[in-house]
Image (cartoon, rainbow, N blue to C red):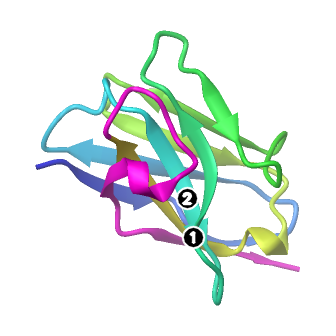
Amino acid sequence: QLQLVESGGGLVQAGGSLRLSCAASGRTVSFAGMGWFRQAPGKEREFVAGITSWIGGNTGYADSVKGRFTISRDNAKNTVYLQMNNLKPEDTAVYYCAASRGSSYYTSQSTYDFWGQGTQVTVST
């Protein structure tokens, strides 16, 4: 059974940076598309970034994070990362990583079979 564990969250001032990690265990995720989602208080969980399993790792981002966040993967470490720069208070949320059932990534939560427990990111003004 695949397990995903996020880490790297915390409290940071606006304009700062964090790097989230999503470590997979139980089986390889090298063939799975991976995604990062987030859920702010009182809001629905939303897509943040995704990366395919294909050579080159095609990526996609929500408009709200384009140019600030970068998703990457290290298949040798069975880990996916989310580098977050120039953080804003509106980025405050619990961040989740997820593994899709195919090789691509998707913006819809329903296409992901495995989820981590989440890591809190809080951006202060």
Whole-percent x and y of residue 34? 44, 39
Dividing the picture into quadrants, the one containing residue 32 is top left
Q: Name the residue under label 2.
A: 37
Instruction: Name the residue type under label 1.
Output: Arg
Q: Can residue 121 be seen in this view?
A: no
Instruction: Name the residue type under label 2.
Output: Phe
- Most foreground residue, 83 or 95: 95
Mark-to-mark CA distance, 2 and 1: 6 Å
Q: Mark 1 points at which residue?
A: 45
Can you say whether 3 is above or below 118 in the image?
A: above
Q: In this view, does 27 lie to the left or right of 47?
A: left
Whole-percent x and y of residue 71? 60, 37
Can you say whether 62 is above or below 44 in the image?
A: above
Q: How many labels does the image show?
A: 2
What range is drawn magenta here? 101-125
- Most foreground residue, 112 or 28: 112
